[in-house]
Every structure is written in C-alpha cells, then in structure tokens.
Amino acid sequence: MAIQRMDNVGIVVDDMDAAVAFFVELGMELEGRGEVQGPFADQCTGLEGVHCDIAMLRTPDGHSRLELAKYRSPAVISSGPRNRPHNVLGTHRVMFAVDDIEDTVARLRPHGAALVGEIARFEDSYLLCYVRGPEGIIVGLAEQLP
C-alpha cells in the first residue's frame, strides 16, 4: 500500500488574517475558512479541548494545499524566537515555484516578508531564496531559469 498524495502542510499561526493575506499575495487561493472542535479534534491531536479556526489555501494548479490553524484552546505554546535560523532541528519551510522571484519578494514585503539571506543563483537552473513570513514561517521561493 502506498500513499496517494500529500494532502496539505499545516502551520499554526497567531494572526490568521495576516497569514492568509501573505499567502494570497503569494498567489495561493483561499479555499475556505472554518472552525474545528470536538472529540475528533481532541483524539486526532492528542490535546484536550481543541478549538481552532482554520483556513485552507491551495496553489493555482490545485495540487497543493496549506492549512493555517489559529488555536483558541488549548493555548498556543511558543517554541522560542520566531527568527530562528534555517538550520534549527525541526524547522521546516514551504517552497513555492514562482514566475518572477524579485517581483514576488517585492509584493510580499508589505506583508512583513524579509529575506533570510539573499536571492541566489543555482548554476544555470534556478534563482532561489528564503523569506521569513508571518509568525516567522520560512518560505522558499524558486524561479526556474530559461
């Protein structure tokens, strides 16, 4: 038996509206918003009294989704500074293919994005960079070169 697909990546956020605005500006489409609570949520997460708001976003091709969750209860636990370096164990990033990396970075800056390093060229294949978005999320951007 094999997996069918990767369904989504989940990220816990504190400011849902800012996070949704960031990913919509990136080019994702808001699929919907809702609330999750009840026994199934407690059982699935291993937490008690789960009540959270969620937003589901999808890439324009419809193949990938991102689930943002803002916990009302139990209280969110901070895992330390939000500006942790890229090489911290457990740190994850989400990578997106973009048409124009410089334009994308410029459009995300008003939403709080800041380059982690620089836009770098990988051989004659890609321009790549990491930006830190809402909640300290590291978002990778990749522009394939012609």
Image (cartoon, rainbow, N blue to C red):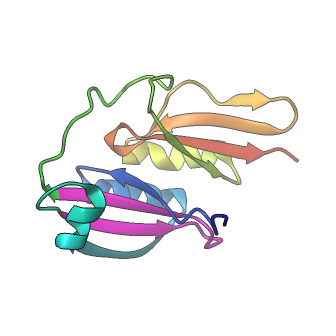
Region rendered in magenta: 51-71
**Vertical comparison of 79 with 66: above or below:** above
Along the viewing direction, whichever of 96 and 75 lies nearer the viewer: 75
Residue nearest the observer in this picture, 67 or 99? 67
Q: Residue furthest front?
A: 1
**Residue found at x 54% / y 62%:** 27
Q: Main secondary structure of the magenta part?
A: strand
Give left or right: position of 109 versus 62.
Answer: left
- 102 or 94, which is in the foreground? 94
**102 horizontally vs 146: left or right:** left
x 67%, y 52%: residue: 98
Q: Residue 55 appears at what percent x and percent y?
A: 34, 67
Residue 5 seen by the camera: yes
Q: Residue at x 45, y 42 (%)?
A: 109
Magenta-colored stretch includes residue 118: no
Compared with 119, 94 (above or below) is below
Q: In x, y percent, where is residue 92?
A: 48, 38
Q: Is residue 60 magenta?
A: yes
Q: Is residue 49 left or right of residue 126?
A: left
Relative height, residue 72 to residue 91 (above, below) = below
